[in-house]
């Protein structure tokens, strides 16, 4: 790293805009899962779009590679610098202003470094809802949410991040700014450029601000937590709710008995709201902006039918916002509790919704055949067909030895995914973990087109190298 470039960047950013002490840069060099520990000479912390532009201009001139970073909550190492220390990290967290909220346009203009939680709060204060919700929403930032096309708990109703963006402001690898912060519902003017940057994981440009779509705030919200006898029963329950009123199903989450055991074992202050533990669980959230919709009656009616038919073993309905939050905590602590239980290999996969039960059963059997004592912990967004088919190390196995077999485990699960026409990465993206799978899954014209797009926008390969494309 040339001192001259760092000195020039420090001049542009000012003393609070650059970190160079290894103690300060270390947290930006490692991912949440601790799969990758990189190094960087500097973490750049611009406070404005103009500063991002000036920084990228200087880095391009010097041929220096840049890794954009938001809340650094990636599950696939999407925001970490390389081990050789040559890449600079560009962290957006100082760009966290709400630029505009409009309850009539149902739009929120927000900077990339604002957390998802801040976006939700701003929407709520305007009497609206920003409907994207994920476990890491207090830390994850809008730039990362959009760059990874995050999904989460409410995709079943509102779609992914991609479906919730009207406009973008993006700094291109050469420092040019694209001012695309339009809030129009109709704008049919050539290629849809914003969708190129959504899901590109910072390999094409750096998103600095966005116009997000809001929806009316729900007037009624109901949450139920159910014990169910099988994966198939969980799907049956989803179908019952969906048939009854598809517009009211805001989330439908599946959890395995073992996953819940880990949450109850490792997370302080959680309790199961049911008399007994069960082999499988489902969490249902219904919500509607309609006045006097009678959501509670609908919830009870569907649950009673399911109880009578043996589709549900037991159920608890939240009576307050605090109880709703307590139930959601049982779901949202799955990642943290698995981290505490030891080494785990994640498979963020999707299959057609109707195939989820077979997929879970067959993938569990395939993993058991591969490794004695391996523990499958499937959970997640059943209503989207997106299951986190995570594998926990055998109790008596060394964690590093288990992780050394990660590709073998992932490939075993993905062979089942492929039989059902699914995807090897449903919502977490590709990052550094999965580029090796791209030729096999997206090879031919698809990968070729992606490479041509990358080359056209970032010919020198300066942005987020080693991510997405093999
Ligand atoms: C979730 O749904 C996240 O909680 C994380 O996507 C999933 O830890 C995981 O595998
Ligand atoms: Zn998820």
Image: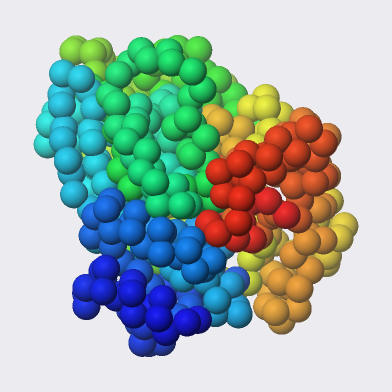
Residue 114 versus residue 188 in the image, above or below: below
Give the x, y percent position of residue 55.
Answer: 36, 62
Image quarter hosting the C terminus: bottom right
Tag count in the figure? 0
- Please indicate, yes or no, whether residue 62 appears anywhere in the rendered image: yes
Give the x, y percent position of residue 207.
Answer: 39, 46
Question: Horizontal placement of 351 versus 328: left or right?
Answer: right
Q: Nearer the viewer, residue 425 or 272?
A: 425
The residue positioned 48% from the left and 52% from the top of the image is 173
Question: Horizontal placement of 403 versus 313: left or right?
Answer: right
Give the x, y percent position of residue 199.
Answer: 52, 41
Q: Nearer the viewer, residue 313 or 154?
A: 154
Residue 427 versus residue 368 in the image, above or below: above
Residue situated furthest right in the rendering: 369
Give the x, y percent position of residue 265.
Answer: 47, 68
- Figure coloring: rainbow
Question: Horizontal placement of 288 versus 377: left or right?
Answer: left
The residue positioned 12% from the left and 36% from the top of the image is 125
The residue positioned 60% from the left and 56% from the top of the image is 460
Where, by quadrant of the figure, is residue 317 drawn? top left
- Please indicate, yes or no, whether residue 76 appears anywhere in the rendered image: no
The residue positioned 51% from the left and 22% from the top of the image is 191
Residue 29 versus residue 215 in the image, above or below: below
């Amino acid at each position: 790293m040339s001192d001259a470039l760092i000195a020039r960047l420090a001049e542009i950013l000012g003393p609070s805009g650059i970190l160079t002490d290894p103690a300060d840069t270390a947290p930006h060099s490692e991912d949440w899962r601790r799969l990758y520990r990189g190094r960087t000479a500097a973490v750049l912390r611009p406070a404005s779009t103009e500063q991002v532009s000036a920084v990228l201009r200087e880095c391009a001139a010097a041929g220096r590679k840049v890794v954009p970073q938001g809340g650094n909550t990636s599950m696939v190492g999407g925001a970490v610098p390389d081990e050789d220390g040559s890449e600079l990290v560009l962290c957006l967290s100082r760009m966290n202003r709400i630029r505009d909220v409009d309850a009539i346009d149902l739009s929120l203009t927000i900077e990339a470094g604002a957390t998802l939680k801040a976006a939700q709060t701003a929407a709520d204060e305007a009497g609206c809802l920003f409907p994207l919700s994920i476990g890491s929403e207090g830390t994850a930032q809008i730039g990362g949410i959009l760059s990874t096309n995050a999904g989460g708990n409410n995709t079943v109703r509102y779609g992914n991040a991609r479906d919730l963006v009207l406009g973008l402001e993006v700094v291109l690898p050469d420092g040019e700014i694209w001012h695309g912060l339009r809030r129009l519902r109709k704008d049919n003017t050539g290629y849809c450029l914003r969708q190129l940057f959504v899901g590109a994981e910072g390999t094409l440009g750096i998103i600095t601000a966005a116009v997000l779509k809001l929806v009316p705030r729900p007037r009624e919200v109901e949450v139920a937590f159910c014990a169910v006898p099988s994966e198939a029963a969980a799907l049956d329950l989803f179908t019952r709710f969906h048939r009854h009123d598809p517009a009211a199903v805001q989330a439908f989450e599946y959890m395995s008995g073992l996953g819940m055991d880990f949450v109850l074992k490792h997370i302080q202050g959680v309790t199961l709201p049911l008399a007994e533990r069960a082999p499988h669980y489902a969490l249902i959230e219904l919500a509607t902006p309609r006045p006097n919709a009678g959501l509670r009656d609908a919830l009870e009616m569907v649950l009673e039918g399911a109880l009578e038919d043996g589709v549900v073993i037991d159920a608890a309905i939240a009576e307050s916002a605090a109880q709703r939050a307590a139930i959601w905590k049982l779901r949202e602590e799955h990642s943290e509790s698995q981290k505490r239980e030891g080494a785990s290999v994640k498979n963020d996969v999707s299959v057609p919704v109707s195939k989820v039960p077979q997929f879970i059963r067959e993938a569990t059997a395939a993993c058991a055949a591969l490794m004695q004592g391996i523990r499958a912990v499937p959970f997640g967004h059943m209503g989207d067909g997106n299951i986190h088919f995570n594998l926990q190390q055998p109790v008596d196995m060394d964690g590093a030895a288990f992780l050394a077999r990660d590709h073998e485990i992932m490939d075993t699960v993905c062979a089942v995914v492929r039989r059902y026409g699914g995807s090897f990465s449903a919502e977490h993206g590709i990052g550094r973990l999965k580029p090796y799978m791209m030729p096999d899954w997206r090879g031919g014209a698809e990968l070729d087109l992606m490479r041509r797009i990358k080359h056209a926008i970032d010919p020198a390969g300066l942005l987020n190298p080693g991510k997405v494309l093999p």
